[in-house]
Image: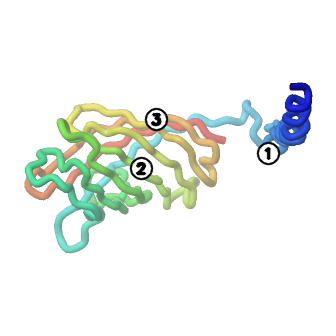
Amino acid sequence: MFTQFFFFFLLFTPFIFTTQQDTHDFVRTLDRKMFGLDQNQEKFSHFRFYWHDVVSGRNPSSIEVVSSGLKNSTTSFGAVNMIENPLTLEPQLNSQLVGMAQGFYASTSQSEVTLLMAMNFAITEGKYNGSSFTILGRNPVFNKKREMPVIGGSGLFRFARGYAQLRTHWFSPATRDAIVEYTVYLLHY
């Protein structure tokens, strides 16, 4: 009995010590100030855009890349659209362009029109030109008001977090084109 215990002890002891020793080599605590992340310098910004989802016409900004596998689905469950939607200051598509929403949305419910949306809002004008923030969340499109989280960003939106409130400004059931007002609140450095 002692020899069996001793054998197992010798066999597993190096593994236990190696595992214990290696567990902290992949992570370490950093000083925020080394990266210019002083909490007193964090900014709180508010943006308002109009997001244009153009599905119809000769030059759509949203194209279906995966069709729903269900023939009688009222929600297009399973369909996926890839987007590069204009972001403008006013509801009119020809108003000032301030960025592009690039990403995809997918129909995720069999009982209501609900989308999983993953988008980078790439800003092309002003102080934030070249910076972007990312929205990822659930969008029950026929609710009057919706909310989705901002989960990160790049450039001047590095370490961004916050939320977006959505309100449909216009929707055409015939073409499925839509204009959605996005009101975004961001904490960033």
| Residue at disc 2, secondary structure | strand
| Residue farthest top in this picture | 1
Judging depth in this view, the residue of 24 and 159 nearest the camera is 24
N-terminal of the pair, mark 2 or mark 3, is: 2
Q: What residue is at 20 percent from the left and 74 percent from the top?
A: 58
- Tell me, yes or no, if residue 117 can be seen here: yes
Residue located beneath label 1 in the image = 26
N-terminal of the pair, mark 1 or mark 2, is: 1
Question: What is the spatial separation of the Cα atoms under label 2 and label 3, in whole angstroms?
Answer: 13 Å
Judging depth in this view, the residue of 140 and 71 nearest the camera is 71
Q: Quadrant of the N terminus?
A: top right
Observer-side mark, 2 or 3, equals 2
Q: Amino acid at mark 3?
A: Tyr
How crowded is the residue under tag 1: few (<14 C-alpha within 10 Å), some, or many (20+)? Answer: few
Q: What residue is at 76 percent from the left and 35 percent from the top?
A: 38
Question: Horizontal placement of 145 versus 122: left or right?
Answer: left
N-terminal of the pair, mark 3 or mark 1, is: 1
Residue located beneath label 2 in the image = 118
Q: Circles 1 and 2: CB distance less than 8 Å?
A: no
Q: Which image quarter: residue 74? A: top left
Q: Which mark is residue 163?
A: 3
Question: What is the spatial separation of the Cα atoms under label 3 and label 1, in whole angstroms?
Answer: 31 Å
Q: Position of residue 158 (x, y in %)?
A: 63, 47
Q: Position of residue 3 (x, y in %)?
A: 91, 31
